[in-house]
Amino acid sequence: MSSTATSSPKTFRVKSFGCQMNVYDGERMAELLAAEGMSAAGDGDDADLVVLNTCHIREKATEKVYSDIGRLRREDGSAPMIAVAGCVAQAEGEEIMTRAPSVKVVVGPQSYHRLPEMVAEAASGKRATETDMPAEAKFAALPKRRKSAPTAFLTVQEGCDKFCTYCVVPYTRGAEISRPFSDLVEEAKLLVAGGAREITLLGQNVNAWTGEDDKGRSIGLDGLARALAADPDLKRIRYTTSHPNDMTDGLIAAHGELEKLMPFLHPVQAGSDRVLKAMNRSHTADSYLKVLDRIRAARPDIALSGDFIVGFPGETDAEFEETLRLVDAVRYAQAFSFKYSARPGTPAATMPDHVPAAVMDERLQRLQAALNRDQLAFNQGSVGKTCEVLVERKGKHPGQWLGKSPWLQSVHFAGEAEIGQMVTVKLVEAGPNSLAGQLV
Ligand code: 5AD
Ligand code: SF4
C-alpha cells in the first residue's frame, strides 16, 4: 500500500493508554525515536509524528482510537504522521489501515523496536504494518536506558498463558515470555544510575517470571527481587500484576525477608466460585483467601489490592453478593473494579446471559462504595505511623512535596527535601486518596 510521501518527522509525541506495561512500552518507544535524532514535542506544541499506544482490554477502546485519529490536527490544520501501536494495533491492524487512511504506521507490542524504520518507510510514502510476535527480538534491539524518574517501570515478563475467558491479553500480547535475568539486572542498574530509587517489575503475569541466575540456578520472581535488592542505591521493589496461582512459597517468604520488597499485592476478579470457574481463573475464593493468610503471616503489614469485574456473563445477584462478601472479608487498601466488557474472540463473549448494562452499573456502584470505604479506613488506620516516603515531585503549594508510602499511598508534606530522596515522615491526617505527613 502506498500514499503520498511526507517529510521525515523531526518531533514526536507518544500517547500511552491503558496499563503500566503500555507506559513502559511508550517510554521505550520515545527513547528509540530520540536515539534516531528526533525530539519530543513540548507540552502543547504540535508534533510531526504522534504515536497512539493503544489498549484493547475493555470497552470501546477501538472506537476511542478512531476518534483520536480523527481529532489529531496541527495548528495549521494539517495532520501529523500517525502511528498506532499497542494492543489495538495487534488486534485490528488491518482494519485500522483500511478504515483510517491518515494512519501511516501500525505496529504491535512485540515489534515496536522497528518503529524508526517504519516511520522512515512512511515518510517515503509507503504505509507500514508489523504485527508479528517474535519471541524476544524487541528488547535486544532497544537503546540502553538512561535518565529515569525516582520511580521506574521494568518489564520482566510479557504475555499470558492463563486464558481467562474474558481477557484479550493472551491474543494481543501472545504467550508468556520471561526476559533473561542478566538483561534485567543490567537494565535495573542503568535505571538506578539514571536516578531510579524504586523499580516496579511489570508483567501481565509477573509472578510467573522464571529465569536462571548468574550461577545457572533456576529462580523465580523472588530470586530476581533478591538480586536487585543487593544494589544499595535501589530502595524499593514492587511488582504487578500477579496471579494468585503463581504466589510461590519463595515469593511469599521474600515478603517477610526483604525489607525492600514493598508490602502490596494485586490479584482476584470475583467472589463466586461458579463465576471464577467460568472465568477460568483456576482458583476458588477460599484458596485465594488462604494465599492471603499465608502472605499476611509472612508480612503482617501487607496492603492488599485487587482487580474486580462485575457483570461477567451469567453473574446472578447472589453471585455478585459473594464478591461483596469477599471484599468485606479482605478489606483492600486499594482496588480497581470494572464492568465486564465483551472482547471479540474471547470465549466469554459468546457465553449466554449477558448482564444488562443497568444491572452492571448498579453492581459497580455498590462494589466501588465498599472499596472506597475500605480504602479510607486503611488510610485512616495509617495515621500515627512513621514511615519512609520516596519523594517523587513538588506539590501544588510552595514548599510542599509529594511522594509514596511503602503501601503505595500518596503522601504530601512540607519542609526540606529533594526529588528522589527517601524521607521519614509521620502520617498525621488521612483522606480517601492521600495522606498528610510531617517530616521527623
Ligand atoms: N472486561 C472487564 N474487565 C476486564 N479486565 C480484563 N479483561 C476485561 C474485560 N473483558 C480487567 C481485569 C484485569 C484488568 C487489567 O482488567 O480485572 O485484571
Ligand atoms: Fe488476562 Fe487472566 Fe492473563 Fe491476567 S491472567 S492477563 S486476566 S488471561
Image: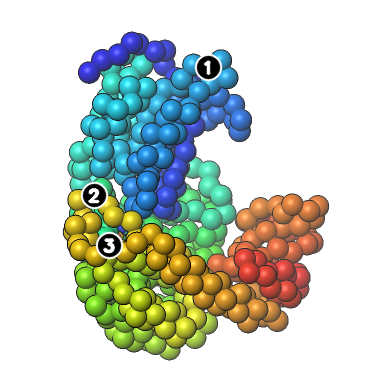
**398 to the left or right of 369:** right
Q: Please provide percent x and percent y for residue 251.
A: 35, 76
Q: Please provide percent x and percent y for residue 186.
A: 39, 52
The colouring scheme, among rainbow, by chain, secondary structure or one colour, is: rainbow
Calculate the distance from the C-alpha at mark 2 to the C-alpha at mark 3: 14 Å
| Mark toward the start of the polypeptide (2 vs 3) | 2
Q: Quadrant of residue 274?
A: bottom left
The residue identified by callout 1 is: 77
The residue identified by callout 2 is: 344
Q: Please provide percent x and percent y for residue 55.
A: 37, 46
- Where is the C terminus found, in terms of image quarters? bottom right
- The residue mark sitting in front, 3 or 1, is 3
In this rendering, the answer to whether 122 lies above or below 356 is above
Say what secondary structure mark 3 lies in: loop
**47 to the left or right of 90:** right
Residue at (59, 26) in percent of width and height: 45
Quarter holding ligand 2: bottom left
What's under tag 2, amino acid-wise?
Answer: Pro
The residue identified by callout 3 is: 354
Residue at (30, 13) in percent of width and height: 3
Residue at (25, 32) in percent of width and height: 95
What's under tag 3, amino acid-wise?
Answer: His
Q: Quadrant of residue 382?
A: bottom right
Label 1 packing within 10 angstroms: few (<14), some (14-19), many (20+):
few
Say what secondary structure mark 2 lies in: loop
- The residue mark sitting in front, 2 or 3, is 3
